Structure formats: C-alpha cells, structure tokens
Image (tube, grey):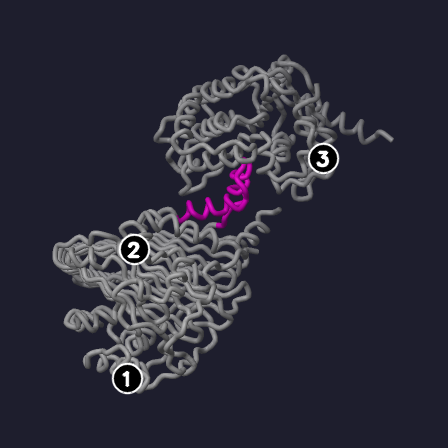
Amino acid sequence: MASLLSIQDLHARVGGKDILKGINLEVGAGEVHAIMGPNGSGKSTLAGVLAGRETYEVTKGSVLFDGKDLLGTPPEERAKAGVFLGFQYPVEIPGVGNLHFLRTALNAQRRAKGEEELDAMDFLALAKEKAKLVQLDAAFMNRSVNEGFSGGEKKRNEIFQMAVLQPRLGLLDETDSGLDIDALRIVAGGVNALRSKDRALVVITHYQRLLDYIVPDHVHVMAAGRIVRSGGRELALELEEKGYGWIGAEGAAAGKAKEARP
Amino acid sequence: MSSTETIQELTRKGYQAGFVTQVEADTLPPGLDEDVIRVLSAKKNEPAFMLEWRLKAYRHWLTLKEPTWQAVKYHPIDYQAIRYYSAPKQKPKKDSLSEVDPEILRTYEKLGIPLEEQKRLQNVAVDAVFDSVSVATTFREKLYKAGVIFCSFSEAVREHPELVERYLGTVVPFSDNFFAALNSAVFSDGSFCYVPKGVKCPMELSTYFRINAADTGQFERTLLVADEGASVSYLEGCTAPMRDTNQLHAAVVELVALDGASIKYSTVQNWYPGDAEGRGGIYNFVTKRGIAHQRAKISWTQVETGSAITWKYPSVILKGDDSVGEFYSVALTNHRQQADTGTKMIHIGKNTRSTIVSKGISAGRGQNTYRGQVKMLKSAANARNYTQCDSLLLGDECGAHTLPYIEVKNATAQVEHEASTSKIGEDQLFYCRQRGISQEDAVSMIVNGFCRQVFKELPMEFAVEAQKLLGVSLEGSVG
C-alpha cells in the first residue's frame, strides 16, 4: 500500500543556509513515527517545510501526501487536505476568541470537502466534547487565541485543535517542550486518543521521555539535516542511554561518505 | 502567494459606495460671500437670529488662517471654487416618504439603508442627509410620542428655534477654529435631537450622510441635547461617490449632556478615500465636542475607514463633578490616506473620569497619527484618565505616530497612558493558514481582533457592518 506521506531526497534552506540535506521518509496511515535528534538537526525545519512555512525554501526533492504533490500548495490547502502542525511555539492572536478561531478553521476545512458548515451550537457541543480529551474548561475556550496561556495550556490547546480538526496527518513539533510531568501526561493522553488506523502521527521530540507515553511504531534519528538512523522503539531507549554524541559522529561520517561518492 | 501580496490584494478591492445618483439639484454657483450666506439662509426660511449668527461666523472666519499644525499634507483648498449649497429638487417638506425622489430612496437602498417604513432596521430611526439637505426622517411619530425631537437641523431651526438658539454654539463656538467658523457660516443641514428630562430614547437614532453632487462642500451640523437624566444612542454613517477631485466635508457636532444624562455617539465614516494613487477623496475636517454636566456621560465611538484626509478630535469637556467621558476609535488608513485623529478630554469637575482607547491601522502608504490631549484643570480633584493607543502596521511603507499631550494642574489627578505598535506577524498569518483559514480571512480576523475593544462599544446592529467595512477597506495596499 502506498504511504500517506512520502518524502524523497528533501533539501531545504533558511536564509541561505542549508538545513535539510536529503530527507527520505515513508509514513503510512495508522502509524506513529517519532523523529528525534539534537538541537539544530533540522527536526522543526522538516515540520515547517511539510506545513508550508514560507521562510523555508525547498531546493530539491519531493513530498507526496496521499499520492499528490504537497510542496506546490499553500499552507491552507495543505491543512484542508488533512495536514496538521502542532506548533512548538503556538502564536497569540489578541482579540480573536479561541473558539471563533477554531470554528472558522473547521468550517473552512469542511467547505473545502463539500461538507456543511457547523453552526455555533453544534460546534460548541463538539468543542466541549473534544476539550475533555485534554482537560480544558469552558472559560479557557473563550479567551483570545493563546493570549496569556501558560506553556502547558498552549500545548493542550494545540492538541484540542487537532482533536476538533481531525487531520489525516498530525505533525507534533516538540509538543513536550516546557511541560511538567502532569501536563505531559494530559497531552500524551490526548494524542493517544487520536491514534487511529486512518491517521498518521509524526512526533518530533528532543527527549525520549514523551515516548514513554506516546509509544511510536518507528523511531528516526536526525543529525545535520539527514535521518541517520531508523528503527523501532528500542532506538529511542538506546538514545536515552547513550545521548546524542555518538549520532553526531555517525551523522558527520555519513555526510562525508555521501560527499565522497563520485 | 506571499502574505505581502495577499495584503496588497486585499487592500486593492474597490470602494463600493462610489456611484453617482442622477437627480435634479438646486445648486448655488461656486464661491462664498455674505450674499451667498443670505441666499442660503433665505432658501431655508431661517429666522433672523440664524442669519445673524452665520454672518458673524463668516466675518470671523475671514480673520482666521487655515491650521497647519496637523500631520497631514494636501494642496491648498480654493474656498471660492466650492459650491456652498446643493439640494435635490423636491418639495421642501416631506410629509411622507412617498414625496421623496425615488432616485434618492434607491440610492439609500443601494447603500443598504432602506428608508421605507416597512423595511427599516429594527428599532433604528434614520435621518438621511443627501448633499446639503435632509431628505427623510423615519420613525418620527413613535419618537414624538416619547417626547423626543429628532429631525433635520433646518426643521429644528424653523420649528424649535428656542432650543436651537439656546444651545447652538455653546459647545463649539463659531470662533473655535477655522473649519468650525466656516461651517457655522454656511452649514446647510444636519440632524437635531432633543431628549427631554428623564426620557430614555426608545430607539437608536441614526443619520446617514451622503455627498452626491460634484464640487460641493458638505457642511452639516448636528446638535444633540440630552436633558437631565435623559439618555440617547446615536449613530452616523457617511459615503460619497468616487470622483477625481477632492471634496471638502467640514462638519460640526455638538453634544450637550445635562445633569445625569448619557449620550452615546457612534460614527462609521466611509467617505470616498480616493484611489490607490491618492487622487480624489474627501477631506474630512470635522469638529466634534460634547459637554458633560454633573454625573453625565458622553461616549464617542468612531470607526474611520474612509476619506483621503481625516482631521477630527471628538472631545469631551467634563464640566460637572463625577462626569464621564469616553473615546473609542478605530482609524484605518490605506493607500495614500492620511488620518490625524484623536480626542481631547478636558477635566474640570471633581472625580471626573475619562477613558481613551485608540486603535490605528496603517496599510499601503497610509499615515496614521493619534493626537490626544488630556487636561486636568486645577478644579479637577481626583480626576482620572486612562489612555491606551495601539497601532498596527500592515506592510512596511505605512506609518503610525502617537502624539499624546498631557497637562495636569491638580496633584490628586491621575493619568495613565499606554501605547504599543505592532506589525501584523508572518507567524500569526501562518498559524491561521495552517489551520485552513485563507490568508485574506486571516488578515481580517487578526485586524478585527485588534479592534475588538472598540467594536464592542458599537450598537450591535452596526458592529457587524463595521467589521465588514474594515474588511473591504483593507482590500488594497500594503507593501
């Protein structure tokens, strides 16, 4: 069966600097992949490129989502096709109500699919149900988007949005950063509830800790813009034990080997 | 498409009220002298005191110089090239709407302001001013029963001269400034409202101003008096056809809130802003001021999206003890529009309180200046002011300026001022788009969020209209 997400030899740069240097990755529906790696290895850049952030320039390679080219489409079209990015740093939008924002997003996506828009009442019922997943209360939902939220609230809000939007591919960019252990459990619980055979999740994290709660099917290690190791869950445990030091050496070696090829 | 391009695209969308209505008009030739004022006054069958007042104002105006302190640039205005009176030809008095020229009724309908009784906005009485004269006032009977007088200014001069004579010029004297003096000399019409003691006006009042004829100036005059303990909410809207030449609009609004009275005055100003290159558009030079007596409250809310140049400072003189003044403003400048706007809060009475919330949005090559004065006189013990000025920039060719003037002569008075300037962020836009919201909708959502504090002060029926207007006005130019 064809992959839901198929990344071939992806290269990208930011501000003239090459960050991604040949990513290859296949993610099937129903799978959970973890991408790990040291700071600066290109994990967040990969998520940004997949979501369509304009500051990243793709210089080479291709990405197919559900068999269709993803890179040529604007971010909103990718979202409508079912790509969701859980932001590492969710943005504040003063004066725009959290629920109003999310309903606008959901209805834009529903329109794109030819579905009827949800009215305020139906949407509220849906939102209340989904908010339980990450233990958000009603008062919180009526505040402005992320304004004055704590770090943990922002991350819960991201997962809440994912639960409402029901994407086919969830890219979670360091969702665990800045969370204490209780918040981490809540967020992970929310993510686990969203695992399904139709949905793929790519979990980007620096720490294996998150993977105790969200158990991945596949683990990939990035270094210097490439995936240098792929394996099962045990790879994450190995990283936990040894740290990223050995990866750095291996990654550099892999890079050199590639450049040395005729 | 990059976000910059989208913002540019957004800001390019046209002005939607720019059509011209073909009606026969009774128009004076261009130019201004005492004879023109006499003719004008005679055409309106005004009592002698009115003509006298106009002539005094005119003579004073001749001694004044056009102000130059404001941060706007324009070519000198030739006051002799302006027509000071233009009225659609019709019977002078409208006993019913059936006597109003159907072309004019259609104009208002096109603008979304149906004047016909059955189609009116729920519970909003409308006075429509077409060029220089009021063409229709709706709901007058219901208001009359409540004791509220709401009519065109011309009618008020004829039918309630004692009220007009008593209050006219008491808040904005004709000697106030250059444009106020000009207005006092030549004002043609406007709205008048009197709410008697203890009466809560049973509906929203609204005046809709339309400039139609070419080369005319519109000089309307509005006078609102809320007697002791009375309250009223009033809204004005404005549009004009698209023309290559600039047209002058110099209005005066006076509000009188007697002891314990409350006046809420909302403006949605959408005069023609000129084209993307800055050709044409209305010069909106307006003097608006209210006086609040004891425990009275005056609240100004304005949404200014139109006009080539906006020059206005709706102000409150907090004369009575415990009186309250408020100013909530959204001013948007796009393309080459210029706005120099703000407020004055003059605290005279004890325990007086004022709040200023100003939201300036600059796009294209628009220039937006907040100019505000807070003055605490010696007598203003325990007076308080809170000012918040926020500027939002869309693109990098526009400008935002904040010029607060604060003067405190009583040590027990408190003044707070907060200001911020931000740029609409790529990050915010990307966040919205990543959720499936189009760039266009995202810009409008972010801008509306920025303005929410002000929009929530508008009467419900108009808050939605203001949001839409903001969307349309943004369509265009941010580099």
Q: For the residues tagged 1 and 3, is the chain the same? A: no
Given the image, on which type of amino acid does mark 2 rest?
Answer: Glu
In the image, residue A72 above or below residue A255: below
Q: Earlier in the sequence, mark 2 or mark 1?
A: 1
Given the image, on which type of amino acid does mark 1 rest?
Answer: Arg
**Chain letter belonging to callout 3:** A
Crowd band around label 1 with a 10 angstrom C-alpha radius: few (<14), some (14–19), many (20+): some
Q: Which mark is residue B117?
A: 2
Q: Which mark is residue A11?
A: 3
Q: Position of residue B61 (x, y in %)?
A: 31, 81
Residue B414 seen in this snapshot: no
User: Toward which corner of the image does residue B36 lie, by quadrant?
Assistant: bottom left
Q: Position of residue B390 (x, y in %)?
A: 40, 52
Q: Is residue B277 magenta?
A: no
Q: Residue at x 83, y 30 (%)?
A: A260
Q: Residue at x 43, y 19 (%)?
A: A182
Crowd band around label 3 with a 10 angstrom C-alpha radius: few (<14), some (14–19), many (20+): many
**Chain letter belonging to callout 2:** B
Secondary structure beneath dot 1 equals: helix
**Chain letter belonging to callout 1:** B
Q: CA distance from mark 2 to mark 1?
A: 36 Å
Give whichever of A210, B157 is nearer the camera: B157
Residue located beneath label 1 in the image: B38
Bounds of the magenta span?
B423-451
CB contact under 8 Å: marks 1 and 3: no
